[in-house]
Image (cartoon, grey):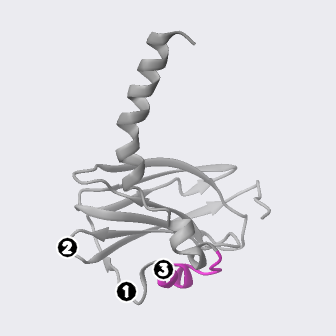
Amino acid sequence: MNRRKFLTLSAVAALMLPIAALATDYRAEKPDTWKAKTVDEAVKALYGDVTPIESSDVHIKAPKVATGAVPVRIQTNIKAKSVAFFQDVNPESAVGVWSVPEDGIVDYHLKIKLRQSDKPAVLSVIVEGLDGKFYTAHTSVTVAGATCEG
């Protein structure tokens, strides 16, 4: 590796280190969240006994009917500390939890696989606000055709 490339990569790594140091490892800190079989169990393992407030400022968008990987978009303009995403048809309910950096923008796009079920899957988002409150939104997706074994 030439010296210039080494210095450039070192500078990029040094800039990324503070960002990585701010991230919370929720899998290590809250392992029961990832074993929970229901959304309520997962929320309790992650945040304790909280009662999230339904909020029109939290948006979760997904197609009403999907096969294979389901595209999901999570957005909020609430100043957030963390964002958690759950579903109710796969064996474990927690999908992901993200720490939101100061002045961070919550506009996440992801794809998830959902098990085909006789009822629509309910996708839920909980936003932990910097104000100490918890906000939530939900949407439903009917999974047709493909299945996710897991």
Magenta stretch bounds: 35-45
Q: Position of residue 124 (x, y in %)?
A: 47, 69
Give the side of residue 58 with respect to residue 141, left or right.
left
Q: Nearer the viewer, residue 24 or 4?
A: 4
Q: Which residue is mark 2?
A: 131
Q: Element at badge 3?
A: helix
Q: Element at badge 1?
A: loop
Determine whether 63 is above or below 16 in the image.
Answer: below
Amino acid under disc 1: Val
Q: Residue at x 52, y 84 (%)?
A: 40
Q: Nearer the viewer, residue 121 or 37?
A: 37
Determine whether 12 is above or below 126 in the image.
Answer: above
Amino acid under disc 3: Val
Q: Which residue is mark 1?
A: 50
Among the 4 quarters of the image, the one containing residue 91: bottom right
**Does residue 37 show up magenta in the picture?**
yes
Among the 4 quarters of the image, the one containing residue 144: bottom right
Specify the quadrant that holds the C terminus: bottom right
Q: Element at badge 2?
A: loop
Give the side of residue 148 with respect to residue 131, left or right.
right
The label on residue 43 is 3
